[in-house]
Amino acid sequence: MTASASGAGDRQPGAQGDGYEPDPRRWRALWVTLVAGFMSLLDVTIVAVALPTVQRDLGASPAEVQWVVSGYALTFALALVTAGRLGDALDRRKIFLLALCGFVLFSAACGAAPDITLLVVARLAQGLAAGFMAPQNSALIQQMFRGAERGRAFGYFGATVGISSASGPIVGGAILALADGMQGWRWIFYVNVPIGVLAVLLGRRLLPRTRKSGRGHVDGWGVLLLGLGVLAFMYPLVQAESGGLSRLWWLFLVGAAVLAVFVRRQRRLLARGTTPLLDPRLFTTVRGYAIGAGVGTLYFIGFSGVWLVFALFYQNGLDYSPLQSGLAVTPFAIGSAGAAVVSGRLVDRFGRLLTVWGLTGVIVGLGTAALLLRFAPLDHAPWFAAPALFVGGVGGGFVVSPNITMTLRDVPVRMAGAAGGALQTGQRLGAAVGTAALPGLFYMVLSHSDDFQVALFVALGVALATMSTSLALAAYDWLRDRRRRAAHGECPEEVANTPVHSRSF
């Protein structure tokens, strides 16, 4: 049976042979997945503002308390592709609900942990549950929506990703301010429990079941190889603050070798007619997937590290409280939220051009903020920088949501979980690089100059250089589509809604 490699049949509502019937509960079901996704992504950054309190209350060492953040990120990334493949092969609804139940349970365990060892163990388990839940979010959107509706749904999904990443310090600071006193940090975890329980109850009623495709095989050796490869790349990064990059640099070479073996195995399985864990054709025949994954990974390297650098600048340089530090970057979160929702409605019309505009806006906004915070008087610099951060946030809203839509919209629904898992794995790796490198660079400059403004300026400059690379990749993709459109005499809407390749998939 021959299908479009772009999965166009997956996109067109009511297309013959597609078997798609709109679920009248799909928009309510979407909000269940978005709430769960918001919690899981928020927990990547929300805990950072509470680390000093956790360290004091539990008598932990700096290396131990760092695992509260890095351990979650590690197990989160390890689970993504395998969880996505299991969702494709079995039942996305069931895996989503089981993972959500686990996330709620381990959140409660984190809040109740009597010592740092049990807290770290609970965080590792919580990250694993989040990793199993995350790829089901994007896969369920692929399953429940088609055409322009899918763009709108991914717009809300992109807004969730952007807001959760940017608002972690704000929410964490607010919770610590409201739960003032000893052990107040525990409410950062407890707050997930009532929200998660409500999401489980609603999810049981609203989420659709996955039609079995007969592709229940899961490549066990592939799971092991991919896990070892991702672990080899992630472990030096999560140990960066304790010298992991200098001690464990050789693991990057090991990881590259293991992932090369993984790719070779996937190709062999495909040649034998066996379903691989991650189909290599996603990167070679699905329009926009490979470039979209690269754009997202590069963007998250700069984007994720920026917020830790801002937190260090405001809290250590200007003596702001965690809440004040979070509020100082609120304009970015506000701009990102509004733009992400709007961009979901525009992506079918403008396509990759939205990502180009968005990355340009982020670079201009954050670049202007970096200049203002470097040269303006410190007493007033945060106020001067607020409009620039808002502009950067609007740009950010036109990056994450359209890029997710452009990357995943042509993926066949039967592969949506694995594709979403691979995309998010790249983002998590990018985030790990950014959160390790940018604060490290900030501290390195500070040790030589003892000037917080210079340290912030240099760290933001490196982040903007990474984002500029992402912009160059997005612009290349846009120009390539534009040349192809001119060669075929197509209008933008035709390009957005017609496949590029037709081959067996």
Image (tube, grey):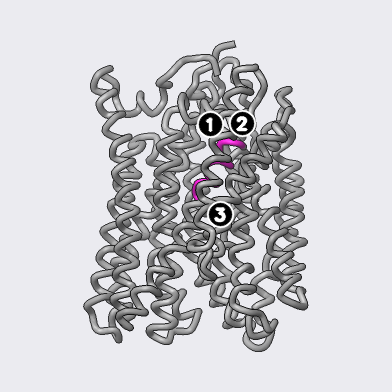
Q: Distance of mark 2 from mark 3, alpha carbons? A: 40 Å
In reply to whether residue 97 is colored magenta, the answer given is no
Residue 80 falls in which quadrant of the image?
top right
In reply to whether residue 425 is colored magenta, the answer given is yes
Q: Residue at x 58, y 57 (%)?
A: 235
* Residue farthest to the top, as pictured: 1
Please name whichever residue, 217 or 135, is drawn nearer the observer in this view of the structure: 217
Q: Which residue is mark 3?
A: 234
Please name whichever residue, 417 or 160, is drawn nearer the observer in this view of the structure: 417
Percent x, y of residue 312: 43, 76
Q: Distance of mark 3 from mark 1, alpha carbons? A: 35 Å
Q: Which residue is mark 1?
A: 146
For disc 1, the neighbor class at 10 Å (few under 14, some 14 to 19, many from 20) is: many
Foreground mark, 2 or 1?
A: 1
**Quarter the N terminus occupies:** top right
Q: Which one is earlier in the sequence, the residue at label 2 or at label 1?
A: 2
Q: Distance of mark 2 from mark 1, alpha carbons? A: 9 Å
Point out the stretch of residues depicted in magenta: 418-427
Is residue 294 left or right of 135 when viewed as pictured?
A: left
Foreground mark, 2 or 3?
A: 3
Q: Amino acid at mark 3?
A: Met
Cβ atoms under marks 3 and 1 closer than 8 Å? no
Q: Which residue is mark 2?
A: 22
Q: Secondary structure at mark 1?
A: loop
